[in-house]
Every structure is written in C-alpha cells, then in structure tokens.
Image: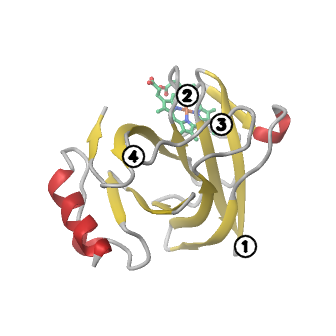
Amino acid sequence: MKRIVGRIALAAACLLPLTCTSALVAADYAHEIQAKKMTFAWTVNDKQLEVKLSADTTGWVAIGFHPADRMQGANYILGYVKDGKVSLTDDFGDTPTGHKPDDKLGGTEDVTLVGGSEENGRTTIEFSIPLASSDVNDGNIDSQGETVVLLAYGPDRDSFKLKHKFRTAMKVNLTSGAASAL
Ligand code: HEM
C-alpha cells in the first residue's frame, strides 16, 4: 500500500522535461524517472538505496549523487554488460570533468551488484549502495531532502574511459519521488 501511494505522489510531483509514470514503474522499485532515453528506478530500503538504471546503449550507464562542482565531488556508480557479465565501478568525481575509482583515491568500493542485462541495444544494471557510505570521499546520500542526481550513459563500447553520449542533472527527493530538472 505504501508503495502505491509513493507512485501516485511521484506521478503528481515530477516536472517536465523529466517524465515520471506510475504505470511504468518496475514492480520491484518504488519510484521511476525517465530522462530522454534513460531510466532511473529506485527504492530507499532502510539504510540502502536500491537502484536500476537503463539506457539505449551497449556501453556504460551511470548515476552520480551530490556533485559540488560539475562532476567534481559526486559519488558515482557506472556499469556495463559484456558477454552477459556485469561490470560495476564505484567512483568519485576528483575533478570538474573527471572521476576515478574510490579505491584509487584512498576509499572503498561500496556497491553491491544485483543484476544486469544487455538486450536489443539497451543496457540495464541493478545494484544497491549504502546511503551512509564509509568511504572517505563519498559522504551521505540524503534520502529525505533534495538530492542532486546526475544520470549519464556512454557510447556503444564497454569502456569506463569513454565520455558520455548523454548526461543530465536533476533534483530528487528519494523518499517522496518528487523530481525537478536543474
Ligand atoms: C566516463 C568518463 C567521463 C568523462 C571522460 C566525462 C567528461 C566530461 C566532460 C569533459 C565534461 C564537460 C563538457 C561537457 O559538458 O560535456 C563533462 C560534464 C558533465 N558530466 Fe561527465 N564525464 C564522464 C562521466 C560522467 C558520469 C558517469 C556522469 C554522471 C553519472 C557525468 C555527468 C556529467 C555532467 C552532469 C556534466 C555537466 C556538468 C555541468 O556543466 O554542470 N559524467 N563530463
């Protein structure tokens, strides 16, 4: 029941150009946002954030939380699927236009793989991360207030080094599902 109420609130609260549709919410997730050809679905589950990302690419899909200056300061998860195997990386934005794996910056990889697929040119990854990471850089993801969320996907090649083909930024209340473009 709680989940249904959340979906209705989401549909009512989202502002263009983001599209938020309760009917299309994957059964397993409480909220969903569609930004162009990219979909972000999620559930706040106690101290974890469960995430599903999909985009029309055979390369990487990614999300970032609370940047300080463009890409800098954000907590990123990127993933791609190659030969049926999902590769994830937990990164941190160390410059305004770049990021590095957490463990190369003195931190820790805190992402748990749930699943993924690549079908008909569309990549989907599912994972969970702690809202309060113990990583030295990541900081906390605020599930109650407004969180700046970055979404991006890369070109059709399985390399985390390639720059995005698409990227966007938005403000999201992860608990209510309310979202607005930045
Ligand atoms: C994979 C390697 C990546 C490279 C080489 C890269 C590189 C860049 C560069 C050069 C810019 C500035 C030029 C532009 O606006 O296009 C930029 C901007 C941006 N990138 Fe990335 N990026 C990468 C990954 C990501 C990821 C994973 C995300 C989010 C999940 C992201 C989100 C953004 C956003 C939102 C901007 C615009 C920032 C602003 O102007 O406010 N990038 N990136």
Identify residue for label 1.
83
Q: Quadrant of residue 126?
A: bottom right
The disc, 1 or 2, on the residue closer to the chain's N-terminal end is: 2
Mark 4 Cα shell of 10 Å, populated few (<14), some (14-19), many (≥20): few
Q: Which residue is mark 3?
A: 138
* CB within 8 Å, label 3 to label 2: no
Mark 3: which amino acid?
Answer: Asp
125 on left or right of 8:
right
- Residue drawn at the location 68% of the way across and 66% of the way down: 113
Residue 74 location (% of width, % of height)? 58, 33
For the N terminus, give its image quadrant. bottom left
Q: Nearer the viewer, mark 1 or mark 2?
A: 2
Q: Amino acid at mark 1?
A: Asp
Pointer 3 or 4: first along the chain: 3
Residue position for label 4: 144
CA neighbours of label 1 inside 10 A, class few (<14), some (14 to 19), many (20+)? few
Q: How many marks?
A: 4
Q: Residues within 10 Å of mark 2 (few under 14, many from 20)?
A: many
Residues at circles 3 and 4 in contact by the CB criterion of under 8 Å:
no
Distance between the alpha carbons at the discs numbered 1 and 3? 30 Å
- Residue drawn 37% across and 68% down? 30
